[in-house]
Amino acid sequence: MKEVNNKWVQFEETKDEFIQSMAKNMKLYGITPSIGRLYGTLYFSDKPMTLDDLRDGVGMSKTSMSTGVRTLADMKMVDPVFKRGVRKDLYRTEEDWYKSFTTLFSRQWKKATETNIEEADEAKESLEYILEDAEDVELIKQIQEAIERINYAKEYYKWLLRFVDVVESGEIYSLVPMEK
């Protein structure tokens, strides 16, 4: 009996270590480690969980968990579940990680890239304004070089938006197939 209990303890510890690793790496997607642990706990649950279940499993306040679940739902990583006779909200993870990735990646990269394009346009406009009545030959040269660099950056950002479109549309999976 002692060996069986020891195996359960090892199982839970291994699972917790993996959840911690997932949580730490979710920072890449703009998700805090605490919300990452929340996701990992839901992911390894064999049934949908309520906020109370999650509080017991993660040790966060109900308010923090509610905010975390809402964040994960907005990112299409967690889905609400309806179960007849259960009055509390139930949640489970989106089982399709590819779908979650494409949604999350597309949203974040598109927003950041569009912001970069706007800022590049503003910087270019400011430089062109300065250039209009500049007389210093070296300053004119530096401004023109800066504008060229900004134009190059904008070309890259436009390419990046096309890449995001390939990811968002799912076309990426014809280029890099999913593992089955």
Image: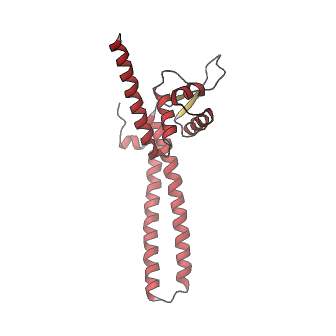
Rendered location of residue 95, percent (x, y): 47, 30
Count of marks placed on residues: 0
Q: Is residue 25 left or right of residue 84?
A: left
Q: Nearer the viewer, residue 30 or 150?
A: 30
Q: Residue at x 44, y 80 (%)?
A: 142
Which corner quadrant holds the C terminus? top left
Which corner quadrant holds the N terminus? top left
Q: Is residue 12 left or right of residue 123?
A: left
Residue found at the far top of this picture: 1
Asked which quadrant contains residue 25, the reply is: top left
Name above or below for residue 153 compared with residue 10: below
Q: Is residue 81 left or right of residue 3?
A: right
Rendered location of residue 60, percent (x, y): 56, 33
Q: Is residue 140 left or right of residue 51?
A: left
Name above or below for residue 94 compared with residue 106: above
Q: Nearer the viewer, residue 64 or 78?
A: 64
Q: Nearer the viewer, residue 92 or 58?
A: 58
Asked which quadrant contains residue 88, the reply is: top right
Rendered location of residue 58, percent (x, y): 52, 30
Q: Residue at x 52, y 86 (%)?
A: 134
Rendered location of residue 118, percent (x, y): 55, 63
Asked which quadrant contains residue 149, the reply is: bottom left
Q: Residue at x 54, y 33 (%)?
A: 78
